[in-house]
Image (spheres, rainbow, N blue to C red):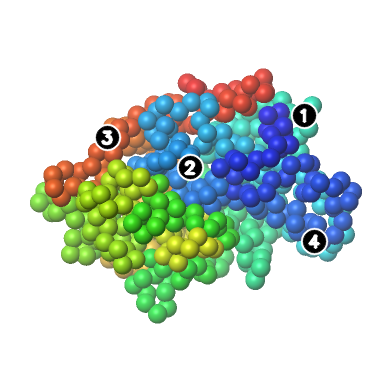
């Protein structure tokens, strides 16, 4: 922890994983003393906003969408955006920049929250607003602990700003951190508003706290807690699946564009995300973008046909057709093309040809800034962002995930026949214009587990959750070892071989504690096998 304390005194603008454009370089929000700073309601608001500044984005800061490249959904290139490739190849170590960056950033945000809670009582302001601000800071502090917990396991629980003399903090047990986070979020959920209005929409709500509890409890297989927390969100009657009034068939695709930005589905979100982030991460080079993260064949093959069949349930000839032409005769789950750009597709008046090796083709596989797989991420990619002036909000957690958490918890509790299981699955599928669950097929715990897992990837692809899902389901080693494939090259009728992955489940389930932390703090213990 001494390392964490010391880095705050350095300018951190060069650190690519920070979600903040400006860091607190001292123990107070500006270069003045605490006595000069903590006076008014405006001072408290500005200090609290610095705690919110650490909330991650999709493709900048802690870039949650890059977590897809640590799962079977995607691959990442360009190590200047983080060396995600070394993790999936099993060659990352204690100096791995992705883990070190997130460790530093989250603890910096935790410190900001602690500083706020220690000093806000100095401000002369409305007592009700001050009380609410304290719960917001506590909830955010719990979220930053939760993020570290789900990556690293047990971490030091920090509830007060740490001086250098106090900085040798030990890791708490994983269960202790889990209990701390759930307790803090529960307290905040019981005291925060269900909704905000106008400029306060970005602030953390009771629903966000319950949603985060449902996500964390599901990860730790605390299914009753996950079920009950998700049901509390549902029972708030605040959230709903977004539907485009003018054209409901486009609802899912529009949800991730400016068209659907203001919606009741978002629960916890990053406001006004950084300019150009998505365009310079996912967009085809041929339309002026950069492709850093590329979808794999595995995620494309997950989507059902419009008849509600997984392609693996079809005959060999049909499987081959859908692998060569994923959206053959426009007969796939519409969430596929809403989430993935496919070879031969026209995007922004430009035909995508990853297998055309012409010198002038910027999107040919192997070219700089081109796709690595023959596919592109379409989710959150809006042509309006070509100018680099992006302001689209990024949803960290949305209502569809909470519904899926609730359904999965019921299934794992052997309550798979509960009517809510099919009800909420059908609600999600109907929004995507997919057929209702075939209850003659999905009529057991095992079959519904199979369906909800497929549905999670179809609905939540590239939003970062898959990395947690494959670990908690115990299939990390099954999916993260061996050859990764991309689109099929029509000239050879063979899929692109992208990379070979290597995963040691006993080690890679957790990330390494950064070496700088180990060196600075003699009481800090490293995770196994690092």
| Residue at image point 53% right, 62% down | 389
| Residue at image point 77% right, 49% down | 29
Q: Which residue is mark 2?
A: 81
- Mark 4 vs mark 2, CA separation in Å: 35 Å
**Which of 208 and 191 lies nearest the eye of the viewer?**
208
- Mark 3 vs mark 1, CA separation in Å: 47 Å
Instruction: Work out whether mark 3 precedes mark 2 in sequence or the reverse, and give the earlier one.
Output: 2
Q: Which mark is residue 164?
A: 1
Residue occupying the far left of the picture: 317
- Mark 3 vs mark 2, CA separation in Å: 23 Å
Query: In this rendering, which labeled residue sits more in front, label 4 or label 2?
Result: 2
Instruction: Work out whether mark 3 precedes mark 4 in sequence or the reverse, and give the earlier one.
Output: 4
Q: How many marks?
A: 4
Q: Which residue is mark 3?
A: 483
Query: In this rendering, which labeled residue sits more in front, label 3 or label 2?
Result: 2
Q: Position of residue 431 (x, y in %)?
A: 37, 68
Instruction: Work out whether mark 4 precedes mark 2 in sequence or the reverse, and give the earlier one.
Output: 4
Q: What element does badge 2 sit on?
A: helix
| Residue at image point 51% right, 36% down | 98
Compared to residue 444, the image places residue 105 above or below, namely: above
Question: Can residue 80 be seen at all in this image of the molecule?
Answer: yes
Q: What element does badge 4 sit on?
A: helix
- Counting other residues with Cα less than 10 Å from the Cα at mark 1, is it few (<14), some (14-19), or many (20 or more)? few
- Tell whether label 4 touches label 3 (CB within 8 Å): no
Q: Which residue is mark 4?
A: 42
Compared to residue 29, the image places residue 436 above or below, namely: below
- Mark 1 vs mark 4, CA separation in Å: 30 Å
- Counting other residues with Cα less than 10 Å from the Cα at mark 4, is it few (<14), some (14-19), or many (20 or more)? few
**Which of 361 and 163 lies nearest the eye of the viewer?**
361
Instruction: Work out whether mark 2 precedes mark 1 in sequence or the reverse, and give the earlier one.
Output: 2
- Counting other residues with Cα less than 10 Å from the Cα at mark 3, is it few (<14), some (14-19), or many (20 or more)? few
């Amino acid at each position: 922890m001494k390392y964490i304390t010391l880095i705050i005194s350095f300018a951190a603008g060069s650190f690519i994983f920070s979600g903040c454009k400006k860091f607190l370089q001292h123990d107070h929000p500006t270069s003045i003393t605490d006595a000069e700073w903590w006076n008014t309601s405006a001072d408290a608001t500005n200090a609290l906003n610095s705690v919110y500044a650490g909330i991650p984005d999709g493709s900048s800061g802690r870039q949650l969408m890059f977590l897809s490249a640590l799962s079977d959904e995607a691959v990442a290139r360009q190590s200047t955006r983080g060396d995600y490739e070394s993790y999936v190849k099993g060659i990352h170590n204690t100096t791995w920049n992705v883990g070190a960056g997130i460790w530093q950033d989250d603890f910096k945000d935790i410190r900001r929250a602690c500083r706020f809670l220690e000093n806000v009582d100095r401000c002369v302001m409305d007592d009700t607003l001050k009380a609410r601000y304290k719960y917001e800071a506590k909830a955010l502090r719990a979220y930053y602990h939760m993020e570290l917990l789900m990556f690293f396991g047990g971490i030091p629980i920090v509830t007060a700003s740490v001086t250098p003399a106090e900085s040798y903090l030990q890791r708490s047990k994983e269960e202790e951190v889990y209990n701390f986070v759930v307790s803090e979020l529960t307290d905040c959920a019981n005291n925060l508003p269900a909704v905000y209005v106008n400029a306060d929409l970005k602030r953390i709500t009771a629903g966000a706290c319950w949603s985060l509890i449902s996500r964390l409890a599901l990860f730790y297989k605390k299914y009753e807690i996950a079920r009950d927390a998700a049901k509390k969100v549902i029972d708030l009657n605040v959230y709903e699946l977004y539907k485009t009034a003018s054209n409901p068939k486009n609802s899912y695709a529009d949800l991730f564009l400016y068209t659907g930005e203001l919606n009741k589905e978002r629960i916890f979100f990053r406001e006004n995300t950084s300019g150009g982030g998505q365009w310079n991460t996912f967009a085809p080079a041929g339309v002026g973008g950069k492709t850093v993260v590329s979808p794999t064949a595995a995620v494309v093959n997950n989507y059902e046909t419009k008849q509600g069949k997984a392609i693996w349930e079809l005959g060999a000839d049909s499987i081959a057709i859908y692998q060569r032409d994923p959206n053959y005769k426009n007969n796939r789950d519409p969430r596929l093309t809403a989430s993935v750009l496919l070879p031969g597709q026209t995007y922004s008046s430009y035909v995508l040809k990853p297998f055309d090796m012409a010198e002038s083709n910027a999107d040919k596989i192997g070219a700089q800034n081109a796709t690595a797989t023959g596919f592109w991420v379409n989710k959150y990619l809006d042509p309006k962002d070509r100018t680099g002036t992006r302001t689209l909000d990024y949803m960290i957690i949305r209502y569809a995930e909470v519904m899926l958490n609730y359904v999965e918890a019921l299934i794992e509790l052997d309550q798979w026949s509960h009517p809510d299981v099919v009800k909420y699955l059908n609600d999600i599928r109907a929004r995507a214009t997919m057929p209702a669950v075939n209850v003659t097929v999905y009529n057991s715990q095992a079959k519904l587990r199979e369906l909800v897992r497929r549905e999670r990837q179809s609905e939540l692809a590239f939003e970062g959750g898959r990395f947690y899902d494959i670990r908690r389901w115990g299939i990390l080693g099954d999916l993260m070892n061996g050859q990764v494939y991309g689109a099929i090259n029509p000239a050879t009728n063979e899929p692109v071989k992208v990379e070979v992955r290597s995963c040691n489940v006993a080690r890679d389930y957790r990330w390494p504690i950064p070496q700088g932390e180990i060196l600075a703090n003699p009481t800090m213990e490293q995770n196994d096998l690092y």
